[in-house]
Amino acid sequence: MKAAIAGAGEEALHTIRKAHEYGLKVLALDGNPEAAGLREADEALVVDISNEEAVLRALGGAGVDFLLTAPIGRYLTTTGAANDALGLPGISREMAEVCTDKFRFHQRLWENGLRQCRCYGVEENRITDADGRESELSGAGGLSAREWELSFPAILKPRYGSGSRGIHMISGPGDLEGALRQVFGEPYVLEECVAGPEYGVDAAVTREGFWMILLRLKENTPPPARQAVGYFSVPPSDPFYGKVRDYMREAAVCLGLEECLIHADIIRGENGPFAIELSARPSGHNLHNLFTPLCTGVDMAEQYIRYRMGLSHSFRPRQTRSMMIHYFDMEGRVRRAPEREQVQRNLKARLAAWECRIRAGQVLGPVSDGHSLMGRGYFVLEGGDAAFLREQGEIVKGLFGGRTWL
């Protein structure tokens, strides 16, 4: 059998390697000729994956049995379009579009009572509410056609794509006027902030139904970036776990998601789970390929490959270990770079994984987005509760020279 993958960056390597373990031939497509996945694949094509027609031409006679998905942003739609055109199983373009377009995503969940906040689409000189009513933006950033409703604080973020790029936290009308003047030229969404702790979800939908694999509590940097710097596994015995599972099952049906892997960001709000974003692809940042398998025994990429090949498969967690993955969110000049053995000697928790690319003398800047953080590496600890793991994580980071280095 033969599989293809559109988007062959470093985070696609795990999926490609798992496919090879099962004897699959892999065709990888990416617009970057230096993409790591192109070197790993059996066939490599340098194709701009934002160009659906070019991708369809490349896949048209390739004899592909199914497409795989890796962590990817807006151009998940290309995978959906290819499935539609070639009659392949998996996500459709419509599924991908409703996930990658934050305004359509809100509208769909809003209509079904699954997302309770005011949200507007902002593009050029127009603003649109969830019911599709449009008004013009005045030069001062207000509405000239009708008065709008919005509670503060609010958030203004790009309508397409993922990550923490271009986010504006809006505390009141004055901030809004200034922010709106800055974002003309790119579609944005403006929505009310929902307060509460943030979580990540790994899940899957197959012909057998919806499968919740792992719920992860996030540790974020302060607003506006709110970049995740750590995750803690949440046991199924936690009452919120069951609420998220039921909510996610409803959301998957509402969005029409079928036969795909799922990653979502969820807030634990006053009224229950609230989806920030949800997409038909696996989580990045060494989650689906490392942290989730360590916690649950479920390798999402492997099980999806088995599912597509008609082999026995299971997305049911074997267990949920108490674990934390943390990234190196320190700032300043590094005094020393400890080795794995030294780190373990200083801990009461088990050091389950260690990947450190930081060197003594290196100057670490502030964490503003995933790009500024992920190249540094990560560590995974096991044991105790979240408070204990957080304490142990501080010990790890302290081994590099202290919390305040400059």
Image (cartoon, rainbow, N blue to C red):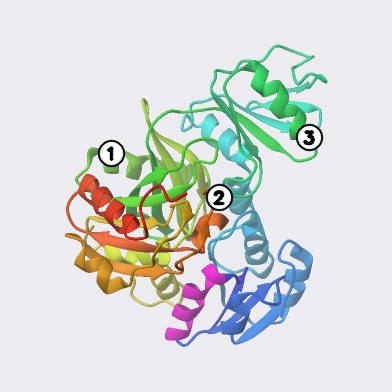
Are there few (<14), some (14-19), or many (20+) residues within 10 Å of tag 1?
Answer: some
Looking at the image, residue 124 sits to the left or right of residue 395; the answer is: right
Residue type, numbered disc 2: Asp
Please give the residue where the numbered disc 1 appears in the rendered image.
240
Query: Which mark is first along the chain, 1 or 3?
Result: 3
Q: Is residue 234 visible?
A: no
Q: Secondary structure at mark 3?
A: loop
Q: Quadrant of residue 266?
A: top left
**Residue span colored magenta:** 10-21
Please give the residue where the numbered disc 2 appears in the rendered image.
369
Q: Secondary structure at mark 1?
A: helix
Q: Position of residue 110 (x, y in %)?
A: 53, 30
Please give the residue where the numbered disc 3 appears in the rendered image.
184
Residue type, numbered disc 3: Phe
Residue type, numbered disc 1: Phe
Above or below, 248 relative to 304: above
Looking at the image, residue 249 sits to the left or right of residue 78; the answer is: left
Q: Is residue 205 magenta?
A: no
Q: Quadrant of residue 205?
A: bottom left
